[in-house]
Amino acid sequence: MRARAAGFAMLEVLVAILLLALGVLGGAAMQLTALRTRHQSALLSRAMQLAAGLAEQMRANPAQMRLPDGSNPYLSLRYDALAEPSPAPPAALCFGAGARCDSAELAWFDLYQLKWLVSQGLPGGRAVVCRDRAVWQGGRLRWQCDGGADAPLVVKVGWQHKNPDGSAQRDAGGQFAPGVALAVGVAP
């Protein structure tokens, strides 16, 4: 009788160890998911800060914003950090003591600064400024711009999102979607 009881005790210990191991694995999986979510949230916050910062710089440069779309330097922004990892500095660097820039030089400096921040802060980062009426398509943000002089001005910033398994997240067209699209209200 005693030998049988010892066998049951050993079985109970093995079941307890198995349950403990499953609990530890579940906790570790939850921790990894939380870390991945926190990282994606930090990237989204960074992208929003960059888009809002550029929108404010655009509003603060009304001389360039009044130009026709073809002459407005801000509307030339189509930046991809994978294609241009080290953006070339503009002719005038508009910071520091004694730096004097006109509105066009300031616009080019603003764009350089955004490119540099996107390349440093967002993995596979991208930034676009365009006129777009249909920022959303199929419930997702999109990079394409439909243009039109009466369409709102939009700053789009994104990075290469990851799926839970670590693979790159792509849309139906094989691209990653922008993380942020911010309409820029510019006073006439």
Image (cartoon, rainbow, N blue to C red):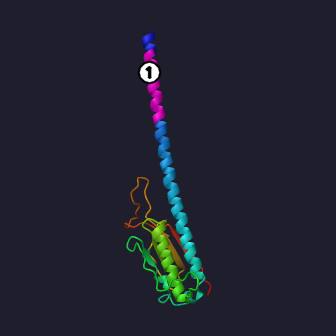
Image spot of residue 19 (x, y percent): 47, 32
Q: Which residue lies furthest to the front in this view?
A: 97
Vertical relation: 64 (above or below) 52: below
Outermost residue toward the top in this view: 1
Task: Identify the residue at image location x=47%, y=75%.
Answer: 115
Is residue 75 shown to the viewer in this render?
Answer: yes
Q: Residues within 10 Å of mark 1 (few under 14, many from 20)?
A: few
**Quadrant hosting residue 173:** bottom left
Q: Hey, which residue is sitting farthest right in the picture?
A: 187
Q: Name the residue under label 1.
A: 10
Q: Does the magenta portion include 166? A: no
Q: Kindly state the secondary structure of the residue where label 1 is placed.
A: helix
User: The C terminus is located in which quarter?
Assistant: bottom right
Residue in front for this viewpoint, 66 or 172: 66
Report the span colored magenta.
6-21
Between residue 135 and residue 38, name the one nearer to us: 38
Q: Position of residue 40 (x, y in %)?
A: 50, 59
Q: Position of residue 53 (x, y in %)?
A: 57, 74
Q: Which amino acid does label 1 sit on?
A: Met
Q: Which quarter of the rendered picture does the N terminus lie within? A: top left
Q: Is the magenta stretch mostly helix, strand or loop?
A: helix
Q: Residue at x 57, y 77 (%)?
A: 55
Left or right of 185: which side holds 86?
left
Total marks in image? 1
In the image, is residue 161 above or below residue 5? Answer: below
Q: Position of residue 166 (x, y in %)?
A: 41, 55
Magenta span has 16?
Answer: yes
